Image: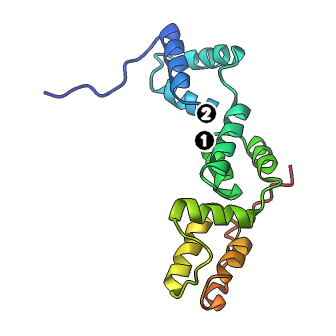
Amino acid sequence: MGFDRRPKKLGPEALYEYAVGALGRRSLTESELRRKLYTRATKPDDIDEVIERIRSLGYLDDVRVAESHVNIRKEFDALGSRRVFSELRRRGVDAETAKRTVAEAYDQTDESEQIRRYLERKLARRLDKSIDDPKEVARLTRTLMRAGFSSGKIVEALQKVAADPGWLDGVEDPEPLDLEST
């Protein structure tokens, strides 16, 4: 005896209530909310009406979601700008808004200090002790790249603690992120 796992389809008013509830649990971008509503709407045309109604009430604002996301990821998670930009794009924030929001938030940020904070908070690793293992240096390099820091600052930070700074030769950014061009 199986259960039907498909979500119950909702009419316009119930879809609106569902959307308000979803936004009450977590801030969502318009794109994220659209995906949620798509699985629940009896008619796809109802989605646009619900989105417009919610937007007109001020419940849906991608800029506000982007600013909140950037501040949390920068201040509490100590992530780099590249990672935060990429997360915003995955959440459906348009490229221009994502670039502008990240650029404004990281404008006065010292990336070297951000790397230090990240390593201390996330990895319980301080940059005052020498690293004698090239595999550990490589692992930290990959970790910091995934965290969204530029290769130049990663190399600069890790060369200070690597027993052999040559272990960091050839570390490059996969692609440059230009946040100033907006």
- Local packing at callout 1 (Cα closer than 10 Å; few below 14, some 14-19, many 20+) is some
Q: Are dots 2 and 1 in contact, CB under 8 Å?
A: yes
Which amino acid type is marked by label 2?
A: Ser
Q: How is the image coloured?
A: rainbow
Residue lying at 60% horizontally and 52% vertically, measured from the top left: 77
Around disc 2, counting alpha carbons within 10 Å, would you say few (fewer than 14), some (14 to 19), or many (20 or more)?
Answer: some
Q: Position of residue 85 (x, y in %)?
A: 68, 51
x%, y% of residue 46? 56, 15
Q: Residue at x 51, y 26 (%)?
A: 25
> Quarter of the image containing the N terminus?
top left
Q: Earlier in the sequence, mark 2 or mark 1?
A: 2
Residue drawn at point x = 51 percent, y = 65 percent? 124
Q: Which residue is mark 1?
A: 91
Query: 178 and 65: which one is in front?
Result: 65
Q: Which residue is mark 2?
A: 31
Q: Amino acid at mark 1?
A: Arg
**122 to 41, vertically: above or below:** below
Per the model, the C-alpha gap separating discs 2 and 1 is: 7 Å
Q: Is residue 81 above or below residue 33?
A: below
Residue projecting furthest to the front:
128
Observer able to see residue 146: no
- Residue farthest toward the left in the current orientation of the protein: 1
- The answer to whether 34 is drawn above or below residue 168 in the figure is above
Mark 2: secondary structure: helix
Considering every residue shown, the one lying at the far top of the view is 13
Q: What percent of the width, then of the height, locates residue 22? A: 51, 24
Please state the horizontal and vertical placement of residue 89, each as a whole percent of the image.
65, 46
